[in-house]
């Protein structure tokens, strides 16, 4: 099970995350593209760090929303969604060249990620933009109970699809993440986080917050490392799961 993490989300004097400590522990770095966080120097430093530890690079595009950290939904047409993604992917790919790197996947951020999982036309626009940029570029989306439908959509458009699960988030009976507004939505216990990671890796699913078994086969596990407790959880997951073969 490959571990991915959202990185490069500092901006100017504002520091976010512990990238230098997280990068050696993960396999895939979701690098902010400047629309919700990051600036050219932050991106450059993040890519150099990824190159040092041979971590795969994923673009982490978002709505154009620096003040809201990309967490506010913004109404766009499908054509505008395509343009937003192509603009950000092009910028990050250009930055990658200096480090001898290339993008291998795309993982939308925040509200854009949430919106595409609720609205088929938005998801199709994201898939089309990914394919337009490069046909071998994969798209990473959250795994849900509708994953077979999403796989079919990706196959029809002609892009590889990566399914993502979360070790530190509770799931509801519909296979969706429990809203952060509800108690217990985010796991705090490192032991619980590790158990959920192992469940996804070994059993292809997880129990919901009410105890219902959910079949959620994932290709990658998202981990967060923006505080000391989260960093400890990543280390525990890495030690338990080991490096993917």
Image (cartoon, rainbow, N blue to C red):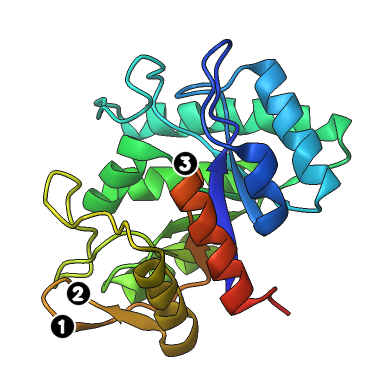
**Residue labelled with disc 3:** 227
Left or right, residue 186 beside residue 241: left
Is residue 198 in view from this perspective?
A: yes
Query: Which label sits in the foreground, 2 or 3?
Result: 3
**Residue drawn at point x = 32 percent, y = 20 percent:** 68
Residue 38's place in the image compared with 223, above or below, is: above
**Residue drawn at point x = 35 percent, y = 44 percent:** 113
Query: Which residue is nearer to you in this view: 240 or 68?
Result: 240
Contact, mark 2 vs mark 1 (Cβ under 8 Å): yes
Q: How much space separates mark 2 and mark 1, taking CA atoms?
A: 5 Å
Query: Which label sits in the foreground, 3 or 1?
Result: 3
**Residue labelled with disc 1:** 212
**Residue labelled with disc 2:** 208
**Residue drawn at point x = 75 percent, y = 26 percent:** 44
Crowding around mark 3 (Cα neighbors within 10 Å: few <14, some 14 to 19, many 20+) is: few
Crowding around mark 2 (Cα neighbors within 10 Å: few <14, some 14 to 19, many 20+) is: some
């Amino acid at each position: 099970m490959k571990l991915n993490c959202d990185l490069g989300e500092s901006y100017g004097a504002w520091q976010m995350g512990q990238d230098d400590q997280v990068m050696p522990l993960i396999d895939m770095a979701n690098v902010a593209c400047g629309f919700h966080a990051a600036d050219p120097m932050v991106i450059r430093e993040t890519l150099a760090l990824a190159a040092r530890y041979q971590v795969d690079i994923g673009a982490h595009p978002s709505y154009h929303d620096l003040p809201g950290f990309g967490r506010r939904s913004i109404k766009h047409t499908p054509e505008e969604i395509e343009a937003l993604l192509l603009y950000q992917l092009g910028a990050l790919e250009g930055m990658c060249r200096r480090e001898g790197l290339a993008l291998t996947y795309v993982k939308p951020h925040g509200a854009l990620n949430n919106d595409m999982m609720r609205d088929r036309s938005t998801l199709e626009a994201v898939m089309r933009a990914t394919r337009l940029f490069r046909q071998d570029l994969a798209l990473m989306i959250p795994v849900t109970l509708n994953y077979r439908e999403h796989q079919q959509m990706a196959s029809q458009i002609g892009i590889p699809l990566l399914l993502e699960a979360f070790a530190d988030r509770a799931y509801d009976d519909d296979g969706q993440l429990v809203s952060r507004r509800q108690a217990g939505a985010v796991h705090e216990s490192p032991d619980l986080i590790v158990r959920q990671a192992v469940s996804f890796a070994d059993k292809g699913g997880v129990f919901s917050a009410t105890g219902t078994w959910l079949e959620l086969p994932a290709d990658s596990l998202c981990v967060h490392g923006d505080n000391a407790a989260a960093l400890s959880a990543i280390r525990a997951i890495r030690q338990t799961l080991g490096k993917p073969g």
